[in-house]
Image (cartoon, coloured by chain):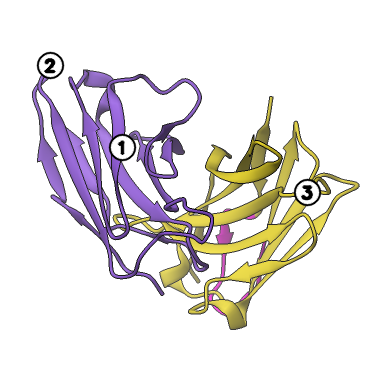
């Protein structure tokens, strides 16, 4: 059974750096095709993709936030860490990490959605 | 970035009645492997989003068969054959054809 859980501060001040950790179990991020993504939902707004890291270390960022984001993985700890610099009140949101699913069809693995999500962690940016 | 547009944005429904949500992209979601990279997610009140449908029409594990997805290229639809009270929440389409993955604005379904 795959589970993910986000952790980090609930309040940060403007201009500070946010560090969020996604601790997961039930899969290995070193296995081919695996990935973990970060998505957020600001209050009253839609879901927004932030970043994704693949089993091979390939990282894909939202270009609108790329200069502020860093995603890393620690396979031995089963963790993915997202840092976001220069926090602003507009970054107030619930932040989720999610497992990028894969399924085998024939001899190849194919994408099968963000199939398991963490419970989310709410971050408020306020002085 | 690929822009995803959902309609309607609000959908009042009655239990037992069908419901349908449209999602359009401004670029084709067809991958070279022949699959359209379009998912549907539901975020119930106070809960994390959950995967309903991936690659247009594949139901995720545990998703009731009253949910179905269809479409191709740039035009997609999620249908609920008979709405149940537990189906209320915000429905999102998401394209995974290219990063950044992008979501629609969300469709709020309530009874």
Chain rendered purple:
B
Neighbor class of circle 1 (other Cα within 10 Å; few <14, some 14-19, many 20+) is: many
Q: How many marks?
A: 3
The correct choice, above or below, for A44 with respect to B21 in the image is: below
- Which quadrant of the view contains residue A37? bottom right
- Which quadrant of the view contains residue A117? top right
Location of mark 3 (residue): A32
Location of mark 1 (residue): B69
User: Chain ID for label 3?
Assistant: A
Question: Which of the marked residues, 2 or 1, is nearer the chain's N terminus?
Answer: 2
Any part of residue A86 in sight: no
**Mark 2 touches mark 3? (CB < 8 Å):** no
Range drawn in magenta: A9-19
Q: CA distance from mark 1 to mark 3?
A: 28 Å
Q: Are marks 2 and 1 on the same chain?
A: yes
Chain rendered yellow:
A
The correct choice, above or below, for B88 with respect to A63 in the image is: above
Residue in the picture at 34% in, 33% down: B44
Q: Residue furthest bottom?
A: A67
Q: Position of residue A104 (x, y in %)?
A: 66, 36
Mark 2 or 3: in front is 3
Q: CA distance from mark 2 to mark 1?
A: 18 Å
Q: Which mark is residue A93?
A: none
Q: Which mark is residue B16?
A: 2
Q: Position of residue B94 (x, y in %)?
A: 39, 53
Residue A8: say if magenta.
no
Residue A15: say if magenta.
yes
Image quarter (top left, top right, bottom left or bottom right) of the N terminus of chain A: top right
Q: Position of residue A126 (x, y in %)?
A: 48, 68
| Left or right placement of residue A63 versus residue A41 in this view | right
Q: Secondary structure at mark 1?
A: strand
Q: CA distance from mark 2 to mark 3?
A: 43 Å
């Amino acid at each position: 059974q795959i589970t993910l859980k986000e952790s980090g501060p609930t309040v940060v001040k403007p201009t500070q750096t946010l560090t969020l950790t996604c601790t997961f179990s039930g899969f290995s991020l070193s296995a081919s095709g695996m990935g973990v993504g970060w998505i957020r939902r600001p209050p009253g707004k839609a879901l927004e993709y932030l970043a994704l890291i693949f089993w091979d270390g390939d990282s894909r960022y939202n270009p609108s936030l790329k200069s502020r984001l860093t995603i890393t993985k620690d396979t031995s700890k089963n963790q993915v860490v997202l840092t976001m610099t220069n926090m602003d009140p507009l970054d107030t949101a619930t932040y989720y990490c999610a497992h990028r699913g894969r399924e085998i069809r024939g001899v190849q693995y194919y994408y099968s959605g963000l199939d398991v999500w963490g419970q989310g962690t709410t971050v408020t940016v306020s002085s | 970035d690929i822009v995803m547009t959902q309609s309607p944005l609000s959908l009042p429904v009655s239990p037992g009645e069908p419901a349908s949500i449209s999602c359009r992209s401004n670029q084709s979601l067809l991958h070279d492997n022949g699959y359209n990279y379009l998912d549907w997610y539901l975020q119930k009140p106070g809960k994390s989003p959950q995967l309903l449908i991936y690659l247009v029409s594949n139901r995720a594990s545990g998703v009731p068969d009253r949910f179905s997805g269809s479409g191709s290229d740039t035009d997609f639809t999620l249908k609920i054959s008979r709405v149940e009270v537990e189906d209320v929440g915000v429905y999102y389409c998401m394209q995974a054809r290219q990063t950044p993955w992008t979501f629609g604005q969300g469709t709020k379904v309530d009874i």
